[in-house]
Image (cartoon, rainbow, N blue to C red):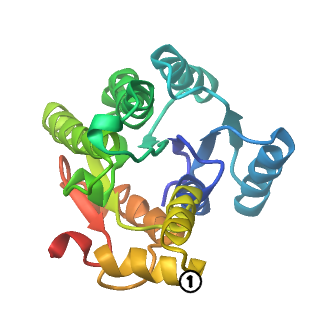
Amino acid sequence: MLKGKVAIVTGSTSGIGLGIAQELARLGSDIVLNGFGDASEIEKIRSDVQREHGVRALHDGADMSKGEAVRDLIEATIERFGRLDILVNNAGIQFTAPVDEFPPAKWQAIIDINLSAAFHGIATAVPQMRRQRWGRIVNIASAHGLVASTHKAAYVAAKHGLVGLTKVVGLETAGSGVTCNAVCPGWVRTPLVEKQISDIAADKHISQKQATNELLAEKQPSLDFVSPAQLGGAVAFLCSAAADQITGTAISVDGGWTAQ
C-alpha cells in the first residue's frame, strides 16, 4: 500500500515508535528511524527492518528537544530521498509531580519534546507535502490529550496542545492532499509505563502484577494494554485511501478510557 513512500517516525528505536515504523515498513514505505540508545542495538533494529521488509531504513539521531535539529531531520530526509510522505511525531518523555512541586526544567523538557518538536517537524514538512499533493502527518498524542490525570501537568498540557495543533494543521492543509490527525493511545506497556508501575508497587508495597492491575483498573476498562502493533495499524489506516477525508481529528485507541 505504501510502496515508494518515505516515512519519518520520531522516537522509533523502541516501544510505540518502533511498532509504527515496522508496520509502515511492512506496507512498503522506506523508513527514517529516530531516537537515542546503544549504537549497536540501533543498528540491529535498522538492519532488521530493512532486511525483513525489503525497504530502505536509515537512522537519524536528531535531538527532538532542539527545534533546529528537528528541522534538519526533515530537510536531510527530503534531500536524501527526494520526498517525504509520512511524518509520525511520536517522541515523548514523562515526569510526574504535583504542579506546585513540578521542576521548571522538567516542564520545559516535556513541552519541547512532546509538543514543540511536532510543530517544528510539521512546519518543515508541510511545504514538501503540498508540492507532492500528498502527505500524512500523524501525531501520537495520548488519552491525556483529551482528559487529565493528577501530577502530569506538563504531559497533559503538551498532549492537549498536540491535539490542538493537529486541528489547526488539518484545517490549514484541507483540500491539499495532506492530512493531519492525532492517535490517542491509552496505557501501552512501554518503558515509561513500566516505571509508573514500579513507582506504584514501591509506593504501596505491592507486587508488580498488583500494581499493573491497579494501573489498568483505574483508567482502562478493557483491563488490557494497547500494543505498539495496534497503534501501527491505526497509523497505517490513516495513511490509506480510506482515510483521505479524515483530517484534523483525534482517534482514541484506549480500551474505553475516554468513553467514561
Query: Is residue 27 in view?
Result: no
Q: Nearer the viewer, residue 76 or 93?
A: 93
Q: Is residue 41 above or below residue 171?
A: below
Q: Residue, x 61% and y 59% (percent of image)? A: 22
Kind of residue sitting beneath label 1: Lys
User: Could you classify mark 1 by the number of other residues whose Cα lies within 10 Å: few (under 14), some (14-19), or many (20 or more)?
Assistant: few
Secondary structure of the residue carrying numbered label 1: helix
Q: What percent of the width, then of the height, locates residue 220? A: 32, 77
Q: How many marks?
A: 1
In this image, 84 relative to 107: left or right?
A: right
Q: What percent of the width, then of the height, locates residue 28? A: 59, 56
Q: Is residue 165 above or below residue 29?
A: above
Q: Residue, x 82% and y 49% (percent of image)? A: 41
Q: Residue furthest top?
A: 68
Q: Is residue 96 above or below residue 191?
A: above
Q: What percent of the width, then of the height, locates residue 95? A: 45, 44
Q: Is residue 154 above or below residue 130?
A: below
Find disc 1 in the rendering and name its residue: 209
Give the position of the C terminus as an image quadrant: bottom left
Q: Nearer the viewer, residue 232 or 196?
A: 196
Q: What percent of the width, then of the height, locates residue 58? A: 70, 38
Q: Quadrant of residue 35?
A: top right
